[in-house]
Image (spheres, coloured by chain):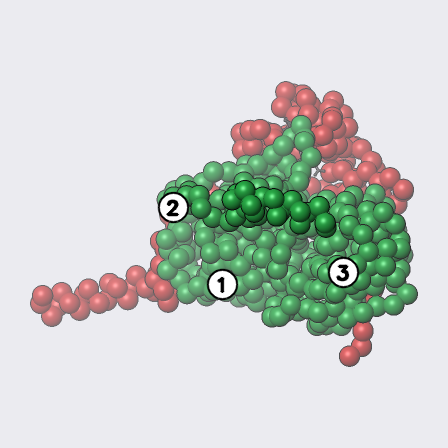
Chain colours: A red, B green
């Protein structure tokens, strides 16, 4: 091997190590397409929400066709399938009913969960527009949005959920600790 | 006695004595040949418990703690809890994406992960909802059903810290969102200080590959924290500046207090102990010697000591703790006991290395009310009846 070739080989290796960052030089760099396709994270600030939009008006049909058989006409739940609406004002009672509307602090959580996990047997089968629409419908069931309110990456994180201020950080230990 | 010796004399004279006096298992018969993968004796029937459900992919099965010895749970009996069933994953096709607030995003396959420096550590994993029936005063009849959503294994893998060093963190990195490859793409956010403290990306369990129910081919082990954050079938780690507020962290595993407020990010599973033998639905066969044995564990560190009461909490005796007492792992405790045949109760309480004392049911109820069913760690009391039957209280 010529000196020149050897040197350029060394340079190339160093560049690859830098590009990979790590000291072990294992794995491979994801392509932009791979990152785009696999990153479904959504944050309460709205970061990660994809383009698209929808309102409860469009959401109603999706809900009736794809959700109501398990969660009931009005989100009241059916058999082992949990309720997803109702229960507002019950959190201090003997029998609290924690639902999306009565309990969840962020509307982005509902969008994220429906996008990840619902419908139960066919998760990932809804388009972004459909997830916006059906999320709007679930919130509409509890009067949190109006029927025509359009939800998108801008408006969804701005919704103030009824129980937004209902959470406190972990105060434990909240029982005895011996002083040693 | 007299008849027995007369009988053995008769058999001895018949020449069949040697055969009749030894059980069949005392040899002489050829056994099974070697086999490629071992199974337990067909006489052993211990198994996980679960209730039949119309949505069987969402649910849990509990470890038979009453049958366990020592501190390791056999992988086949490790408790399960799933929200969308157990995916069957071909490790050759599985990839872990590490991205977000990092200098160099990476895709790692199992064979890559197995080339990093590795660690093996013994840790318990406990579901946040373990023993929830006790707070609600609907205690289950036996220790498997009351406490079975906790198990302890030796986990092998690469530390999350090693992987994060590999990708290089950007200054805004504060939380890691971990995501599974199950149908619901289970996702939980973990604060960075915990992520670089002791979290493992594990591929090994008790000396072999993870079981599918435990996240094969890779899972997170987040020592001492509620089981749900130990994401199974791990496919993505998203380094971010904030928690994602997924369903399980924003709602699912929060604890609702009597004033209507809920505690969020209650990650640690606090110190807890339970007597596994004798325990609910077992029977003492008359007065005499019994060894009381059980398990203790704490999400904050090592178990400092365990005490046992055999007289309704009037007095407590120090139990012997099996060494080594490992951090965030099961500690087995034992106490010799002579039962006088009278009805009584048995209970254990533990203290961990931070000085935290396992509380009573009433102490917990007083501060948390009866709706905070997750993260329950109250003292468990077993009742011994005059006929030797053991029941819950």
The residue tagged with tag 1: helix, strand or loop? strand
Q: Which callout, 1 or 3, points at the residue further toward the start of the chain?
A: 1
State the residue at coordinates (26%, 64%).
Answer: A13
Quadrant including the C terminus of chain A = bottom right
- Residues at marks 2 and 1, CA–CA distance in whole angstroms: 29 Å
Where residue A88 sits: x, y (%)?
A: 83, 37
Describe residue A163's horizontal placement relative to residue A65 as left or right.
Answer: right
Horizontally, is B38 left or right of B390 in the view?
A: left
**Residue A61 location in percent, x, y?**
65, 21
Residues marked 2 and 1, same chain: yes
Chain at tag 1: B
Q: Quadrant of residue A81?
A: top right
Chain ID at mark 2 = B
| Residue sitting at x 66%, y 63% | B332
Q: Which mark is residue B289?
A: 3
Q: Is residue B254 left or right of residue B214?
A: right
Q: Is residue B340 above or below residue A120?
A: below
Question: In the image shown, does A132 or B115 lie closer to the viewer?
Answer: B115
């Amino acid at each position: 091997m010529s000196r020149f070739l050897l040197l350029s080989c060394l340079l190339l290796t160093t560049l690859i190590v830098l590009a990979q960052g790590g000291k072990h030089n294992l794995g491979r760099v994801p392509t932009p397409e791979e990152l785009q396709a696999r990153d479904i994270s959504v944050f309460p600030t709205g970061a990660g929400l994809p383009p698209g939009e929808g309102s409860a008006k469009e959401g109603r049909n999706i809900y009736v066709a794809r959700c109501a058989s398990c969660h009931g006409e009005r989100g009241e739940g059916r058999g082992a399938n949990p309720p997803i609406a109702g229960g507002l004002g019950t959190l201090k009672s003997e029998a609290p009913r924690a639902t999306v509307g009565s309990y969840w602090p962020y509307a982005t959580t509902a969008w994220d969960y429906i996008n990840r996990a619902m419908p139960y047997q066919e998760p990932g089968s809804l388009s972004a527009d459909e997830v916006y629409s059906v999320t709007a419908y679930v919130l509409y069931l509890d009067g949190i949005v109006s029927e025509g309110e359009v939800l998108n990456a801008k408006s969804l994180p701005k919704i103030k959920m009824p129980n937004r201020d209902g959470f406190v950080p972990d105060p434990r230990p909240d029982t005895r600790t011996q002083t040693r | 006695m007299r008849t027995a010796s007369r009988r053995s004399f008769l058999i001895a004279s018949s020449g069949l004595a040697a055969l009749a006096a030894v059980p069949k298992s005392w040899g002489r018969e050829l056994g099974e040949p070697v086999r490629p993968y071992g199974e337990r004796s067909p006489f052993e029937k211990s198994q996980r418990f679960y209730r039949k459900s119309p949505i069987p992919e969402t649910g849990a099965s509990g470890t038979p703690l009453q049958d366990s010895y020592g501190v390791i749970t056999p992988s086949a009996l490790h408790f399960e809890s799933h929200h969308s069933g157990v995916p069957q994953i071909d490790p050759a096709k599985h990839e872990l994406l590490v991205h977000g607030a990092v200098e160099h995003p990476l895709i790692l396959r199992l064979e890559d992960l197995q080339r990093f420096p590795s660690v093996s550590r013994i840790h318990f994993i406990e579901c946040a909802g373990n023993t929830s029936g006790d707070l609600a005063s609907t205690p289950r009849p036996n220790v498997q059903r009351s406490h079975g959503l906790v198990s302890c294994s030796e986990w092998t893998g690469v530390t999350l810290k090693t992987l994060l060093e590999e990708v290089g963190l950007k200054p805004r990195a504060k939380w890691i969102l971990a995501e599974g490859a199950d149908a619901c793409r289970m996702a939980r956010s973990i604060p960075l200080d915990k992520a670089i403290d002791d979290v493992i990306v594990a591929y090994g369990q008790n000396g072999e590959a993870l079981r599918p129910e435990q996240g094969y081919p890779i899972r997170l082990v987040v020592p001492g924290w509620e089981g749900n954050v130990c994401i199974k079938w791990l496919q993505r780690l998203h380094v971010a500046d904030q928690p994602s507020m997924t369903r399980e962290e924003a709602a699912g595993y929060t604890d609702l207090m009597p004033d209507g407020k809920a505690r969020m990010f209650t990650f640690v599973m606090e110190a807890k102990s339970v007597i596994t033998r004798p325990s609910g639905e077992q029977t003492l066969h008359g007065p005499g010697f019994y060894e009381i044995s059980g398990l203790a564990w704490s999400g904050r560190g090592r178990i400092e000591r365990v005490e046992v009461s055999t007289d309704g909490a009037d007095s407590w005796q120090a139990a012997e703790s099996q060494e080594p007492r490992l951090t965030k792992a099961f500690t087995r405790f034992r106490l010799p006991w002579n039962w006088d045949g009278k009805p009584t109760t048995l209970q254990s309480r533990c203290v961990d290395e931070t000085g935290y004392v396992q509380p009573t049911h009433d102490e917990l109820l007083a501060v948390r009310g009866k709706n905070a069913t997750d993260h329950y760690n109250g003292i468990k009391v077993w009742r011994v009846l005059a006929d030797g039957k053991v029941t819950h209280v």
